[in-house]
Amino acid sequence: MSKSPLIEIGSHTHRHYNLSNINTELVREELQKSKLILESITGKPILSIGYPDGDYSDSVKNIAEEVGYKYQLAVTYKDEQDKNDNRIRSRYSISNSTSLNTNKILINKQFNNSGF
């Protein structure tokens, strides 16, 4: 998959901690370790992080940027001001509890509402 020009492999942290609930040293470790592991497997830079549980904070955004993530993704914005922060983007979460057809409809709706 990593060889496909249509697929981007992104990080989701190493141990799936809720990042705003752990100390900054552990946040940095989680973000760096996941990035390094994925880069060693794919041979490509990992530029995106999708936050576990969609949870983040200002310090998490800053650390992610320092570690080298260009795109930070959350299911919902925590603060209204995040809509104007180019580091963080909204994302759609694929659900394993809904049918393939329902996921297709939801993805299509998300794509059509994104302005593309």
Image (cartoon, helix red, strand yellow):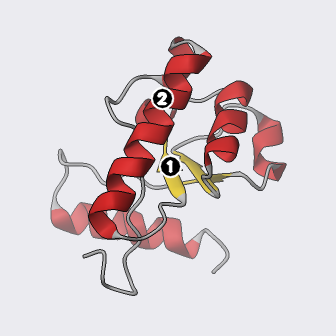
Q: Nearer the viewer, residue 30 or 20?
A: 30
Q: Which residue is mark 1?
A: 49
Residue 11 position (above or below residue 76): below
User: Looking at this view, is 92 or 14 the one in front?
Assistant: 14
CA distance for labels 2 and 1: 14 Å
The residue depicted at 41 percent of the width and 49 percent of the height is 36
Q: Is residue 74 above or below residue 58?
A: below
Instruction: Tell which of 80 and 101 is nearer to you.
Output: 80
Q: Which part of the image, by quadrant, shows the N terminus? A: bottom left
Quarter of the image for residue 61 reads top right
Q: Taking the image as drawn, is residue 79 in sight?
A: yes
Q: Secondary structure at mark 2?
A: helix
Residue at the image point whose x is 31% and y is 29% from the top? 15
Q: Is residue 55 left or right of residue 1?
A: right
Q: Is residue 98 left or right of residue 45?
A: left
| Dot 2 alpha-carbon crowd within 10 angstroms: few under 14, some 14 to 19, many 20 or more | some
| Label of residue 91 in the image | none
Residue projecting furthest to the bottom: 5
Q: What residue is at 44 percent from the left and 49 percent from the top?
A: 35
Contact between marks 2 and 1 (CB within 8 A): the answer is no
Which of the two residues, 36 or 49, is positioned nearer the viewer here? 36
Q: Quadrant of the C terminus?
A: bottom right
Measured as percent of width and height from the top left, residue 57 is found at 67, 26
Q: Which residue is mark 2?
A: 29
Dot 1 surroundings within 10 Å: few (below 14), some, or many (20 or more)? many
